[in-house]
Image (tube, helix red, strand yellow):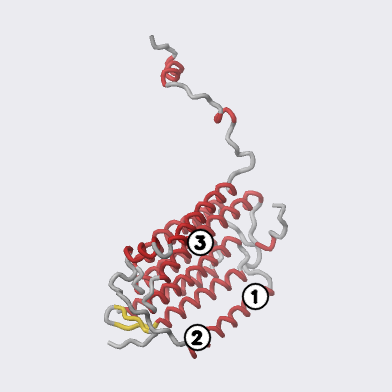
Amino acid sequence: MFLAAGDIQVGNETLGVTGFLLLATALFVLGAIGVLIRRNPLVMLICIELMLNAVNLTLVAFARQLNNLEGQLFALMTMTVAAAEAVVGLAILVDIFRVRAVDDVDELSELRG
Amino acid sequence: MASIVFYLFGFLALAGGLGVVLFREPIKNVLSLVLVMLSLAVLFLLLSAQFVFAVQVIVYAGAVMVLFLFVVALMGPIHEHGSAWRTAGSGILALVVVAAFAGFLWSMLSSVRYRSPDAGDQSLFGTVQAIGVGLFTTYLYPFELTSILLLVAAVGAIYLSRRPGDEPAPELVEEPARSIEDREVERTGIAAS
């Protein structure tokens, strides 16, 4: 069966890889908007995780389309980096919250704690 | 079937993404992100990435999100006084980002040409075996670097979450090792003959 370059075969059905890329772009934009307009630092961290997940979807979709496993390997690397980022970010956040309860990142404009 | 799965879980992922941005309480944001991650895990399975699916469910939706939930529970309810949104300037910036990505989308939909797939044996695509061969041969150094990254992150998190004045008390550190017989004497008050 002939497949166009952007199509992938799932079972006995063909799916366009474009749909996955559109979904990933939408999720990435949602995460970027969240980082830009939300005030709560915890929610901003969650939105960064959302953006990293959207990038993972792109990597895995291209890995499938190109029949090349490197995309999946780098998706795993992204997960590791995301886990490290979440751990350090949450530790900093908990440290800040020990000093005072912050509900707005714009209040954290000085480095004296 | 496959397209039904794609549209269903793509819709769920988008709904979760909207929830992440729009909900006011952090606990609902975190649970929306769990929804996004589980939906994306199903899409990974659709893209025959079985190992990435398992890691996404166990590590991401399991461990990382439990960490977020833990911090939300630790902080207690945060009452955002006034608006949940930041200043108008960041709203304008968000509009600029949306416009830029709309441009990307338009160009992607109108003129993208996909490279034709690589040739090769695809019977093991996405299995643990194929991933392991990739991680331990071609990408050995990045793989080892991620372990160093995780170590540094763990040490940094422990250092950051240490309270000031939280050093172990000197008597705990310098307590001399005592034999079991000494402890028994201390507990019962009877010296063994």
* The label number, if any, that marks residue B91 in the structure image: 1
Q: Secondary structure at mark 2?
A: helix
Q: Report the residue at 51% width, 60% height from top.
A: B27
Question: Relative to A31, is A7 above or below?
Answer: below
Look at label 2 and name its amino acid: Met
Q: Which of the two discs, 3 and 1, sits closer to the camera? A: 3
Query: Residue beneath label 3, please?
Result: A81
B132 left or right of A97 in image: left
Instruction: Identify the residue at horizontal 57%, vertical 53% (top origin).
Output: A91
Q: Amino acid at mark 1?
A: Gly
Q: Do the residues bearing badges 1 and 2 touch, measured as CB atoms within 8 Å?
A: no
For discs 1 and 2, the disc positioned in front in the rendered view:
2
Residue A97 lies left or right of residue A1; in this view the side is right
**Of label 1 and label 2, which has the lower sequence position?**
1
Label 3 to label 1, Cα distance in Å? Answer: 28 Å
Q: Amino acid at mark 3?
A: Val
Spatial separation of the CA atoms under disc 3 and disc 2: 28 Å
Element on which disc 1 rests:
helix
Q: Please state, as top left, top right, bottom left or bottom right, where the N terminus of chain B lies in the image.
A: bottom left
Q: Secondary structure at mark 3?
A: helix
Q: Which residue is mark 2?
A: B108
Are the residues under marks 3 and 2 on the same chain?
Answer: no
The chain carrying label 1 is B
